[in-house]
Image (spheres, helix red, strand yellow):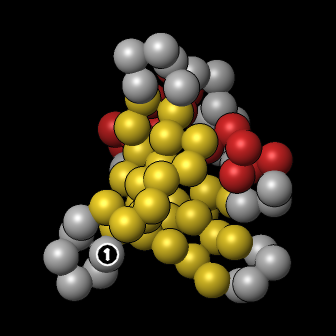
Amino acid sequence: MTVLIPATGHTIKAELEASAQGILWIHELRAATGDRIVSWELLEVLKLGWRIVSTSAEERAVLDTHGFWSGRT
């Protein structure tokens, strides 16, 4: 997925993951290697104003299952 950080205008490529406890996490990926750099709880970064700008069909399904996806996030 791609996430916009409005405060800086930057976008990041991230991987979406649902934990066993039902918490959604996004993991920023290093462009050169695809390794995870840092992780954030999705709900918390959305509260900060971050915005999801693109997702795969699989990611949209996960978001929908967890009540996040409205097509406007």
Q: Is residue 61 above or below residue 53?
A: above
Residue depicted at x 22% and y 84%: 32
Q: Residue furthest top?
A: 21
Q: Residue furthest front?
A: 38
| Percent of width and height locating residue 24 | 52, 33
Give the quadrant of residue 49: bottom right
Front-lying residue, 60 or 37: 37
Residue occupied by mark 1:
30
Residue depicted at x 31% and y 75%: 30
User: Would residue 70 be visible to someone looking at this image?
Assistant: yes
Residue depicted at x 57% and y 64%: 3
Front-lying residue, 58 or 3: 3
Front-lying residue, 42 or 3: 42
Left or right of 59, for residue 73: right
| Percent of width and height locating residue 15 | 37, 53
| Percent of width and height locating residue 69 | 62, 35
Front-lying residue, 60 or 66: 66
| Percent of width and height locating residue 67 | 64, 23
Q: How many marks?
A: 1
Q: Is residue 32 above or below residue 63?
A: below
User: Would residue 72 be visible to someone looking at this image?
Assistant: no
The quarter of the picture where the N terminus appears is: bottom left
Secondary element at image label 1: loop
Q: Is residue 61 above or below residue 6?
A: above
Residue depicted at x 59% and y 42%: 41
Dot 1 amino acid type: Arg
Categorize mark 1 by other alpha carbons within 10 Å: few (<14), some (14-19), many (20+): some
